[in-house]
Image: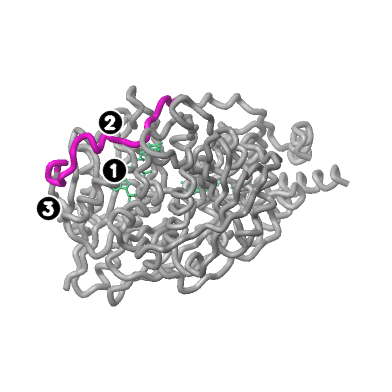
Amino acid sequence: MAEILVYVDHVDGAVRKPTLELLTLARRLGDPVAVALGNGAADTAAALAEHGAVKVLTADAPEFAEYLVVPKVDALQAAYEAVSPAAVLVPSSAEGKEIAARLAVRIGSGIITDAVDLEAGDEGPVATQAAFAASFTTKSRVSKGTPVITVKPNSAPVEAAPAAGAVEALAVSFGPLATGTKVTARTPRESTGRPELTEAAIVVSGGRGVNGAENFAIIEALADSLGAAVGASRAAVDAGWYPHANQVGQTGKSVSPQLYIASGISGAIQHRAGMQTSKTIVAINKDAEAPIFDLVDYGVVGDLFDVVPQLTAEVQARKG
Amino acid sequence: MSLRIVVCVKYVPDATGDRKFADDLTVDRDDVDGLLSELDEYAVEQALQIAEEADDAEVTVLTVGPEDAKDALRKALSMGADKAVHVEDDDLHGSDVMATSLVLAKAIEKTGYDVVIAGMASTDGTMGVLPAILAERLGVPQVTLLSEVKIEDGKVTGRRDGDSASEQLEASLPAVVSVTDQSGEARYPSFKGIMAAKKKPVESLELDDLDIDADEVGLEGSWTAVDSAAERPARTAGTIVKDEGEGGKQLAEYLASQKFI
Ligand SMILES: Cc1cc2nc3c(=O)[nH]c(=O)nc-3n(C[C@H](O)[C@H](O)[C@H](O)COP(=O)(O)OP(=O)(O)OC[C@H]3O[C@@H](n4cnc5c(N)ncnc54)[C@H](O)[C@@H]3O)c2cc1C
Ligand SMILES: Cc1cc2nc3c(=O)[nH]c(=O)nc-3n(C[C@H](O)[C@H](O)[C@H](O)COP(=O)(O)OP(=O)(O)OC[C@H]3O[C@@H](n4cnc5c(N)ncnc54)[C@H](O)[C@@H]3O)c2cc1C
């Protein structure tokens, strides 16, 4: 069977959920061969094998952390040359997309980004994309070279499918461009203990209507009662009430959870671009005319300062 | 020595309009007004600030797009860019990112540059990969997705806020930079700027001028193909209740019925 190269997104050996989802999609196309780079790469093998990786290619070198993007492209290219895969799949993070894109130019292949589904087709993998703030659904293919496709989080279920997952060291030699952009300092983002925004099953977001940084506590309290991630509109972020890392939308994160709860958010097109593919959408807004209500499965017209705390109390009561 | 800055700007359909695909599955440009991609205004802004800091600098804005894309160039010129380059050719219609980036790379080399500045993503294709591809094609460092950028002594430095960390980056020129919407509000064109823009030079280039064959670009020359585009069915109207004191409880009831609690 054809081999499918899967680029692994991990933090010190802990594989992130979007990569496990990629393995589900990769198995529709062939046998997944995973490529894990950097600190803790070999530690990813057990999780990857559990989810269908027949092989795990690993490499670590200081270059991966000390320089931007290109060393990882060099390594992925080495894996590509070693495996001659039928397709290369990469998680759609900002960095993942850049790695995939540079690999695609090098190997003379077309690239599709931000696929939300993937199926085997007669002429290679067929990718579904959500276009124009998710108001259109397109199906596309790579028509030249080995398809390089990046896939958004929450595009497939995580499924156990034990495979060999044999670990092999990948030989990488870095090209002249690898050391072009130096990372001179790195400040890790502090963990909030809440789920990762793009991976969360439930996202609770606040907007301008939250009216102040301190008031985000009521959004956080609701999120915590539901085990959810916290999101924010750009208006709330620009006002300095919540970190940019939590922004949902065109220039923030794109989320696709089972449940999205928007409080005090009007539903501008740029916000919708980042949440419109959520399975169930709920909004709380005091303006019955707010465009967000066009999207909702359930909406409450009311003051969020009344509705949200009552909801939180009710969720806590029901959970006992 | 003058610092040559080339800013890549894209002409896109207005996101607040009714965006659609045409029959050949390319972007329908007839029914919706086009404009300078809002995220590219941030690139123009940073270019202008860098030029203001430098002793001697020249800002050229570059677009690959149809005739009307001149509007995007005019906007950038009225913000303060010095000159514009427009690559316009019927054969470009339907180019994917590989074809587009090939044309941009050749046009940038022809124009001459010390730094290329792009937006973080277009507001229509929204791939967010073109700057990285340009760096690969030009064989220079990529310093992308910056929320802060500075150019000094032949070096570009900046901050990149990633998913798990915030990184400080440094590269030597020439380089390709892209900036996010966190890099600083873009200025509005002044009346004087708008008047001055009318006199600024806009150079038009065709594929021949860049030694690119028609079969390397456009729908035929692209390395990806769109097979179908369907409008997402409108969401079925949801239940909307007015809070009369029990709104939170009613919502909890709904969430429980959907097994979220
Ligand atoms: C290039 C570009 C990129 C952008 N990217 C993004 C992006 O990534 N993400 C994003 O979110 N936006 C983005 N925007 C901004 C976007 O256009 C909107 O300005 C923004 O989403 C508005 O945020 P909001 O809904 O919180 O604020 P508003 O539009 O001001 O809405 C606030 C809402 O809160 C309601 N409200 C007020 N008080 C209460 C209360 N007490 N109880 C209940 N409801 C209340 C109001 O009725 C109103 O509907 C972008 C814009 C541009 C031009
Ligand atoms: C909905 C949709 C989905 C698409 N999906 C794909 C796909 O999966 N694969 C594919 O190969 N093509 C795709 N395309 C085509 C692709 O968008 C164009 O080829 C495009 O010009 C390059 O990608 P982008 O606009 O997404 O650029 P991005 O990578 O998002 O743009 C980043 C920056 O590059 C610069 N830039 C981009 N285009 C131009 C230009 N024409 N002139 C000057 N500067 C520019 C701007 O500074 C911009 O801010 C898609 C187009 C649409 C409308």
Q: Is residue A23 visible?
A: yes
Residue placed most toward the observer, A267 or B225: B225
Let me know if marks 1 and 2 both belong to one chain: yes
Badge 1, how many Cα within 10 Å: few under 14, some, many 20+? many
At a point 58% along the width and 59% down the height, the residue shown is A242
For mark 2, give the secondary structure: helix
**B168 sits left or right of B150 in the view:** right
Residue positioned most to the top: B23
Question: Mark 3 or 2 closer to N-term?
Answer: 3
For mark 3, give the secondary structure: loop
The scheme the figure's colours follow is one colour
At a point 18% along the width and 60% down the height, the residue shown is B112
Badge 2, how many Cα within 10 Å: few under 14, some, many 20+? some
In this rendering, the answer to whether A242 lies above or below A86 is: below
- Subunit ID for the residue under disc 3: B
- The type of residue carrying mark 1 is Thr
The verdict on label 1 being within 8 Å of ligand 2 is yes
- The type of residue carrying mark 3 is Pro
- The type of residue carrying mark 2 is Glu
Residue tagged 1: B100
Q: Mark 1–mark 2 contact, CB under 8 Å?
A: no
Residue tagged 2: B220
Residue placed most toward the observer, B130 or B240: B130
- Can you tell which mark lies on residue B201? 3
Q: Mark 3 to mark 1: distance in Å? A: 23 Å
Q: From which residue to which does the magenta span run?
A: B206-229
Q: Position of residue A71 (x, y in %)?
A: 44, 61
At a point 75% along the width and 32% down the height, the residue shown is B258
**A107 sits left or right of A236 in the view:** left
Q: Position of residue A10 (x, y in %)?
A: 60, 56
